[in-house]
Image: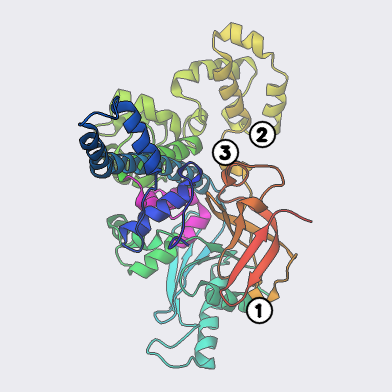
Amino acid sequence: MYYDYSEPVSQMKPHRILAMNRAEKEKVISVKIDVDKEMLTNYLIFQVIKDEASPATPFIKEAIDDALKRLIYPSIEREVRSELTERAEEQAIEVFGDNLQKLLLQPPLKGKVVLGVDPAFRTGCKLSVCDEQGKVLEKGVIYPHEKTKGGRITDEQIKDAQRKLIVLIRKYKVELIAIGNGTASRETESFIADLLKATGMSAQYVIVNEAGASVYSASELAREEFPDFSVEERSAASIARRLQDPLAELVKIDPKSIGVGQYQHDVAPKKLNESLDFVVTQAVNSVGVNVNTASKSLLMHVSGLNKTSANNIVKYRQANGRFNSRKDMLKVPRLGGKTYEQAVGFLRIPDGDEALDMTAVHPESYDAAKKIMALYNITGDMFGKPEVKLIVGNMDRSQLQKELNIDKYTLTDILDAFVAPLRDPRDQFAQPILRSDILKIDDLNVGMELEGTVRNVVDFGAFIDVGLKNDGLLHISKISKSYIKHPKDVLNVGDIVKVFVLNVDKERGKVGLTMLKD
């Protein structure tokens, strides 16, 4: 695209700036900024030379030419390129941050037994069955695609892979199968879809974005969690857990490896890391953390906690058992009063000694909460039940504010906690699309309506998973009939959208999509 390309600096889009920078860095192209040299020369002559007849004029003109060529042009180019790059980096970081936040806040599929599949050809598909809490029940490997030592696959090998899969699904009553979207993903999807159709089993499958799973699998943290697992087996467990609770699993991975940005490896690492760390912390705190089940990775993103304090909480929990109240956390070594005060509002204890500990209400507001409970005969075991919703609906809030001498925001938070103590902001988002059959590119016709999941949002559009081998491209011009400045104004990672097939390139395996119906 860029071998013979030019455009005005004022019209350059951020993603094109970063693309050119990368290509130039790789020595594929050279980039330069063209300026009107004659205009600059005339401007300087007009500013400097007052007497054309002066014998010094030829020397001054020579000096102007030399200054422009050797000093001014390079300086202008450096400044403009630097300003363009800075603007493009800011845009790339903002897009990455938005995409990451939406990815982290994808709704969890709670209470499901999930079979994680890390697809591969030669080395086989690694399997990992995880229970409702993410604990690995059994692992295994099947070879549904080709023999381990090369050569053609036999019917016996396929039947053996089918048998193993059926045994696992029936033994653990697997409801969902999470298939990683890496190498051999669509072939594995086809194998599993055919098996589900042939056996009539009620299990469904989801293609899960496995970006960063290999980074996690080889990490120190993964070795601590699964010391007896191979790298690929850890990856299968991670894929299953990503479906069960995306936030809890994705915080274990360096955000740059999650792959929901554009040119994230070309921007200033310090600025990117600061922005992404803030996004992760914001997501974790908005959801809250069960202090009795949270991993060290999740805890260290809670406001007020760091790697050391998160580690100490986990160690204390392992040595002394579960926390029964938020106050128990003060017993954790090196967890001071200030740290406790800052973090405790984001830490939850379901089924503890104090019902308010499972809510987002901070302990400093417990007195006010208990006064309300006493006034209206509300008990902890009534939290979240219809009768509390009725009581709260009939309260005179302005009168309560005066009686308790609290602001309306604190009162609203307390009453919301009574009505929905385990409220999760992720519940408002659409659940992932569950599939039981596969879609092939040959099945597509122009104008066909499809349902898909937004996998990535970039400056020029969005990539949509409609169940094909590759994600389809939804160009920014095909998102809305009215003008939109950026695709993220309309779409977010994880959104479920209705799209229509715009064009199909079977040779290159590419599909163009549109949200605009003629």
User: Which residue sits furthest front?
Assistant: 53
First along the sequence among labels 1 and 3: 1
Task: Name the residue beneath numbered marker 1.
Answer: 199
* Residue nearer the viewer, 93 or 325: 93
Where residue 467 sits, quadrant-wise, is bottom right
- Reply above or below: 454 against 472: above
Does residue 257 appear in the picture of this structure? no
The residues colored magenta run: 239-268
Q: Position of residue 45 (x, y in %)?
A: 32, 32
For the C terminus, give its image quadrant: bottom right
| Magenta segment includes 116 | no
Disc 2 versus disc 1: nearer the observer = 1
Q: CA distance from mark 1 to mark 3?
A: 38 Å
Give me the disc on residue 425.
Answer: 3
First along the sequence among labels 3 and 2: 2
Q: CA distance from mark 3 to mark 2?
A: 19 Å
Q: Position of residue 389 (x, y in %)?
A: 69, 28
Task: Name the residue beneath numbered marker 2.
Answer: 385
Q: Amino acid at mark 1?
A: Thr
> Which element is circle 3 on?
helix
The total of numbered circles placed on residues is 3
* Residue nearer the viewer, 102 or 203: 102
Q: Amino acid at mark 2?
A: Lys
